Amino acid sequence: MVVVIALVVVVVGSILFHLLSPWWWTPIASNWGYIDATLVITFWITGFVFTAVILFMAYCVWRFRHEPGRVAAFEPENRRLEIWLTVVTGLGVAAMLAPGLVVWKQFVTVPDDATEVEVFAQQWSWSFRLPGEDGRLGTSDAALVGPDNPLGISPFDRFGQDDIIIESDDLYLPIGKPVKMVLRSVDVLHNFYVPEFRAKMDMVPGMVTYFWFTPTRIGEFEVLCAELCGVGHGHMRGFVQIQEETDYQAWLQEQRTFAELWEERRVRTASSDPEQ
Amino acid sequence: MANIPYRPDEQVPPAEVPDVHPPHPHTWIGRWVFSQDAKYIAIQYSATAIAIGLVALVLSWLVRLQLGFPDVFSFSAEAYYQFITMHGMIMVIYLLTAIFLGGFGNYLIPLMVGARDMVFPFVNMLSYWVYLLAVLVLVASFFVPGGPTGAGWTLYPPQAILSGTPGGQDAGIILMLLSLILFIIGFTMGGLNYVVTVLQARTRGMTLMRMPLTVWGIFTATVMALLAFPALFVACVMMLFDRLLGTSFFMPTLVEMGEQLSYGGGSPIVFQHLFWFFGHPEVYIVALPAFGIVSDLISVHARKNVFGYRMMVWAIVIIGALSFIVWAHHMYVSGMHPYFGFFFATTTLIIAVPTAIKVYNWLLTLWRGDIHLTLPMLFALSFVVTFVNGGLTGLFLGNVVVDVPLSDTMFVVAHFHMVMGVAPLMVIFGAIYHWHPLMTGRMLNEAMGQIHFWVTFIGTYAIFFPMHYVGLVGVPRRYPEIGDPAFITTPVDGLNAFISIAAFIVGAAQILFLFNIAWSARNGRDAGGNPWRAASLEWQTPQTPPRHGNWADDLPVVYRWAYDYSVPGAPEDFIAQDDPWVQQTAPT
Ligand code: HEM
Ligand SMILES: [Cu+2]
Ligand SMILES: [Cu+2]
């Protein structure tokens, strides 16, 4: 008897916790409302199944509990019931999968007008690179990384010269414009994760990964690293500032290009090198 | 209704297997240390697994101290990562895999199929000693300079072998990889034994489709493990080479802390594919024995045949096969080609169908049963609750786009603890309450068992159900401390403290359980030969506990499946598998 009550309490308690507790996802700040919608659908379907299964079990335990004189039925199989259940389950699963795949298609298809923004990760900080006036990011290579070239950008690629470098500082993005986040790491795996944007993706040394989104809300959003990257993992945070276009442009004017930084650092290294 | 045919004349094929007598030990050491008796090896395996499992339990307490009370108990990040890594690895490999296959597999397979022992008793013994060596190497890594590895149980390179990770440039990671390699060698010896024993040493009349589902589950899991562990084996060997010999299997050109390393040309993603090609089947290597065992527990204690036996067998086999083509659902956000997402999301959700069928059949076994709420039955019921809960959240994570916000958050931690942590543990507990009388001849103490059950069931649910919401809020996993970032609108600190307290209470209840095992082995109520009135073969041995060689002079002959409970017209509410009883058809 206690078991039956406990099972009912588990179900009712879970539902109440879900509905009444204050813990829910943080308000969204990107175009990925579809992801939230799919998640909510999944909550409904699975919540219904959980409730039905456990309550049915509770009913069985109550109805068929051992009493003197009770004899169990002998029923090895029931073809029709088994096929019926299989088909219904298949349909339910398909109903969840189909919208999921449709949204995934959108998630992996970057719109043509998206601007590229590079995120650069290393233990344990974030840097960024914007394409500059030519709209293209110059090539880069981990082998080029050094004190005078922290992001490893090819000094001989003309597309890289006007790239804007933001070293260990906040990234600003204009609201309402799709961005393709191009992700690069030079040491270990990291993962660029902003809870409000819903999207995340691993950053893998030796390759370039990406995801895209459109910011839809002005504000400051915290970046967390979501792939274990060593002891500093929990402290690897940064910020993305979503701004109106005009504020964004004002910020952009203050940033330095790769060519400027390169010059400056070369001069500094040269003058501090005793052998020269 | 019943359409399993009963044809008495066809029930017993001629003896295919000659009766082989297992070697008899002549020395004390041969009997009690280097025993070749599968039953004794099973107990050695289980005791070792439980002992090392206790270490993992204590580690989970330390982890929960940090997460629940970060201001009071603040461990270093190094220590925190070592705790979670060792906790996770021990639980999955050294406890669950070892106890299901090495423990229950060894004990139950020969008895349930009517064999005198495993087919290769010497190799079987060796399997245990290599496993013990693997455990000792693992334990040794706690004591080397730099401590054990803190790379996470997934051991992803490059960080696993670099200096930013505890143990990466010290001995920690080397010992971890060596220990895994040893474990796999040891397992392979045992695993071949289980498979050959099931295929070759079944007694007369024990057709494959008469085997208890426990054997089906362990057998399928073993076949899977024999196919999956080699992927982990090569991954470990290659990573050892990368670490010790400077090869670059998994290492691209790297700059570590501003310094160029001499690696180049390898791919970290390849490791992830190898790891999860093993790692996903691993989930089912733990789950399938649990499925099989729980089916038997429900059937015996509800005095009713397993509903849809053939469907259950096929579901086990299909799940086993499908689980080899879903591995990359752990890698949706790993940077692999995004189009893989379509394929792996589809296969992952397809696997939900045979899994759901198993759940329905457990419920339909209860339906119109005669349910005895014994401890094994209680644990079986709680398994269904946690497994259904964890299985359903799996549909979130399997459905690729829903996984994007949730992956690498505490939601994932909650999910896999429900489905592959707590659920299989519930089955292990149920199984120990069920078979302890067979192993010792004595019942476990009921009162202690009740306390153990209620604290564990309610407690683990209280730990892991709310944890999903910590992840939903956005808290990543493997964070010793989240602080109070702006995205957390309602702080989760109170919830974390609550979870931690529940974890301490649940842990304490396990101590009571172990005490119960030790205490009841001497003081428990006498179990008699077949206390649960079960039909399967292991309860029909001439002595309880079964002696060396299991059976008397002749092997048993099997006339029926393992589920003849409450058969209409039978003299009792169960008919043992070796009982030749035939329904006398009433003259019409
Ligand atoms: C009372 C029991 C348990 C408690 C309280 C517990 C708690 C935890 C916690 C708090 C974490 C770390 C979360 C993080 O920061 O990422 C963790 C990780 C983990 N646990 Fe458990 N756990 C328990 C039992 C188990 C069992 C039975 C398994 C077996 C499957 C298991 C497998 C794992 C794994 C694989 C990890 C991941 C380690 C990693 O991130 O590398 N745990 N557990
Ligand atoms: Cu990280
Ligand atoms: Cu998986």
Image: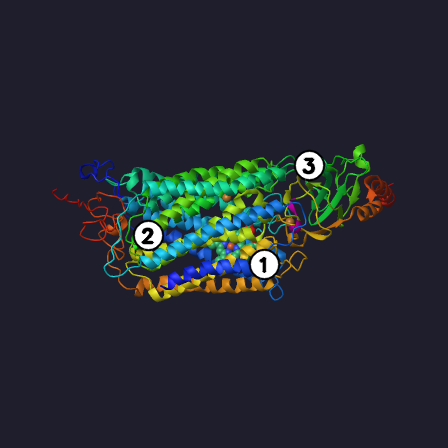
Q: What residue type is disc 1 on?
A: Trp
Judged from the image, the secondary structure of the residue bearing numbered disc 1 is loop
Q: Are marks 2 and 1 on the same chain?
A: no
Q: Residues within 10 Å of mark 3 (few under 14, many from 20)?
A: some
Q: Residues within 10 Å of mark 2 (few under 14, many from 20)?
A: many
Observer-nearest of A186 and A239: A239
The residue beneath circle 2 is: B367
Q: What residue type is disc 3 on?
A: Pro
- What segment carries the magenta color? A188-196
User: Where residue B79 sits: x, y (%)?
Assistant: 59, 57
The residue beneath circle 3 is: A111
Does residue B77 lie above or below B240 as drawn?
Answer: below
Label 2: chain? B
The answer to whether residue B47 of the structure is visible from this angle is no
Observer-nearest of A240 and B236: A240
Give the distance between the C-alpha atoms of the residues marked 1 and 3, in whole angstroms.
33 Å
User: Where residue B182 sits: x, y (%)?
Assistant: 47, 44
Find out whether residue B415 is within the magenta segment. no
Q: Are marks 1 and 3 on the same chain?
A: yes
> Which residue corresponds to the image point at 81% horizontal and 40% vertical from the top-left?
A258
Label 1: chain? A
Does residue A174 lie above or below B248 as drawn?
Answer: below
Kindly tell me whether mark 2's CB lies below 8 Å from ligand 1. no
